[in-house]
């Protein structure tokens, strides 16, 4: 949202090449927040600080991401060039799992109300597709699910830290 209240849609357009450094991990390592604090708790802590302190803490991550303005309709686009689908599109490390593959994900997920209030957790099994990548998604044990837009999706995404199993579906060679 721009200062005048106008909303624009943005899409990833590159990064400065510096490695990602987790602000949350730094806060935990310095004893500023307890281990196991989820993303919502980290954001809440940062927002509780004076602006200068918040800027200092966020500044431990030297990586900057650049964005471009995109059409205002439709969903966000993944690195694979397709529109992301809530609950079905996942980001993976392309060195481990190629973009564009289908798989079956078995895990546990947070369940939130439309206003973002956490209601509980549930097990799930669903087809997913590797449509995106992310700088913090490295190695064979990391996968991020795109949950969509809005308070509910945000609350579920920030609390999704459960182990799971991804079975990739591939064609049998002839």
Image (tube, rainbow, N blue to C red):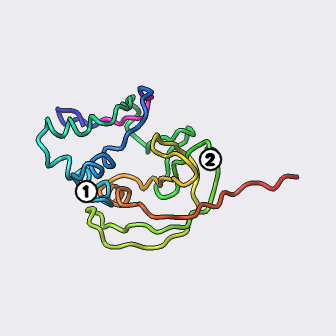
Tag on residue 41? 1
Q: Position of residue 144 (x, y in %)?
A: 47, 53
Q: Is residue 163 above or below residue 72?
A: below
Q: 93 left or right of 64?
A: right
* Residue 12 is inside the magenta segment: yes
Q: Is residue 8 above or below residue 26?
A: above
Query: Nearest the camera: 109 or 81?
Result: 109
Residue range corresponding to the magenta coloring: 8-15
The quadrant of the picture occupied by the N terminus is top left
* Residue 142 is inside the magenta segment: no
Asked which secondary structure carries label 1, the reply is helix
Residue that appears at 73% across and 54% down? 170
Q: Is residue 40 above or below residue 23?
A: below
Q: How crowded is the residue under tag 1: few (<14 C-alpha within 10 Å), some, or many (20+)?
A: some
Q: Residue furthest front?
A: 30
Residue denoted by label 2: 96
Q: Position of residue 31 (x, y in %)?
A: 24, 53
């Amino acid at each position: 949202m721009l200062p005048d209240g106008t909303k624009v849609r943005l899409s990833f357009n590159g990064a400065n090449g510096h490695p990602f450094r987790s602000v949350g991990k730094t806060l935990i390592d310095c004893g500023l927040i307890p281990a196991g604090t989820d993303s919502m708790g980290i954001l809440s802590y940062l927002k509780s600080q004076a602006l200068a302190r918040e800027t200092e803490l966020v500044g431990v991550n030297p990586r900057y991401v650049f964005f471009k303005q995109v059409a205002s309709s439709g969903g966000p686009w993944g690195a694979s060039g397709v529109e992301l689908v809530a609950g079905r599109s996942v980001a993976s490390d392309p060195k481990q799992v190629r973009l564009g593959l289908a798989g079956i994900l078995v895990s546990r997920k947070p369940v939130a109300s439309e206003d973002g209030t956490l209601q509980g957790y549930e097990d799930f099994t669903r087809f997913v597709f590797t449509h995106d990548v992310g700088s913090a998604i490295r190695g064979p044990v990391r996968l991020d699910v795109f949950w969509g837009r809005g308070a509910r999706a945000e609350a579920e995404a920030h609390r999704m830290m459960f182990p799971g199993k991804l079975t990739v579906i591939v064609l049998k060679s002839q």
